[in-house]
Image (cartoon, helix red, strand yellow):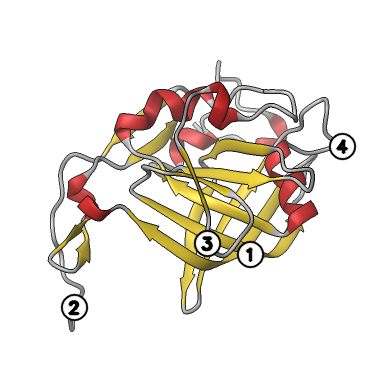
Amino acid sequence: MFYRPEDGHTLPHDPFKAIVSPRPIGWISTRDAQGNNNLAPYSFFNAIADNPPQVMFASTGVKPDRDGTKDSVSNIIETGEFCVNIAEYSAREAMNDTSKAWAREDDEFAKEAIEAGECETINCQRVLNAPASLECKLTRVIELPGPSNRLVLGQVTGIHLRDNCLVDGRFDVTTYQPLSRLGYMDFAKVSELFVMKRPGD
């Protein structure tokens, strides 16, 4: 099968997001200028550089109570700050529930009884028991082709690591089960790890 995206795919569901998988989930927390907290998952997310450390996520679609975007992006544009909380399998239900289209003043931490902690370098909450949380300062928001598609870039200014995830001086993903998005309603947990060195290492 071949199709041009602009012509449509004739399938019951769009296959694009299932093709590019697995994708890590950035559980993005923000706070607006009035002090309202927000927490929402984004699977168009990744790390993009390590010196200095930088991340990206993309937001698509709109909420009716926001002007052409969603709460996370609106808050980030307003304050220039956000936190990426790493999602794990044991938090899958809470993560999924925070994807609801809550009203802009609703606090997903409170609604879903998610324990929160304050960040150190930004004015924002974080998921207290996440394996890791990345405090970020906004560097750029890029308008992408298509309605309400925005790419958010940030530089990491503070990193929280859960103590039990540190093993022999390394952040060890085998201490928890990273959660990823596969497309449609499918998710996966990482339960098997193998080591493969690059040539020359």
Could you tell me which secondary element the residue under label 3 belongs to? loop
Amino acid type, callout 2: Pro
| Disc nearest the viewer among 4 and 3 | 3
Residue that badge 2 annotates: 199
How far apart marks 3 and 2 lie (CA) works out to 39 Å
Q: Position of residue 168 (x, y in %)?
A: 12, 66
| Dot 4 crowding, Cα within 10 Å, few <14, some 14–19, many 20+ | few
Q: Residue at x 16, y 70 (%)?
A: 197
| Disc nearest the viewer among 3 and 2 | 3
Front-lying residue, 57 or 82: 82
Residue that badge 4 annotates: 67
Amino acid type, callout 3: Glu
| Disc nearest the viewer among 2 and 1 | 1
Could you tell me which secondary element the residue under label 4 belongs to? loop
Task: Answer with mark 1 or mark 3, whichever residue precedes in sequence.
Answer: 3
Q: Is residue 78 above or below residue 195?
A: above
Task: Answer with mark 3 or mark 2, whichever residue precedes in sequence.
Answer: 3
User: Splitting the image into 4 quarters, where does residue 44 fall?
Assistant: top right
| Dot 3 crowding, Cα within 10 Å, few <14, some 14–19, many 20+ | some
Q: Is residue 68 left or right of residue 119?
A: right
Amino acid type, callout 1: Lys
In which quadrant of the rendered image does the C terminus lie? bottom left
Task: Answer with mark 4 or mark 3, whichever residue precedes in sequence.
Answer: 4
Task: Answer with mark 2 or mark 4, whichever residue precedes in sequence.
Answer: 4
On the question of residue 8 being in view, the answer is yes
User: Splitting the image into 4 quarters, where does residue 115 fall?
Assistant: top left
Residue that badge 1 annotates: 137
Amino acid type, callout 4: Asp
Could you tell me which secondary element the residue under label 2 belongs to? loop
Q: Is residue 99 above or below residue 181?
A: above
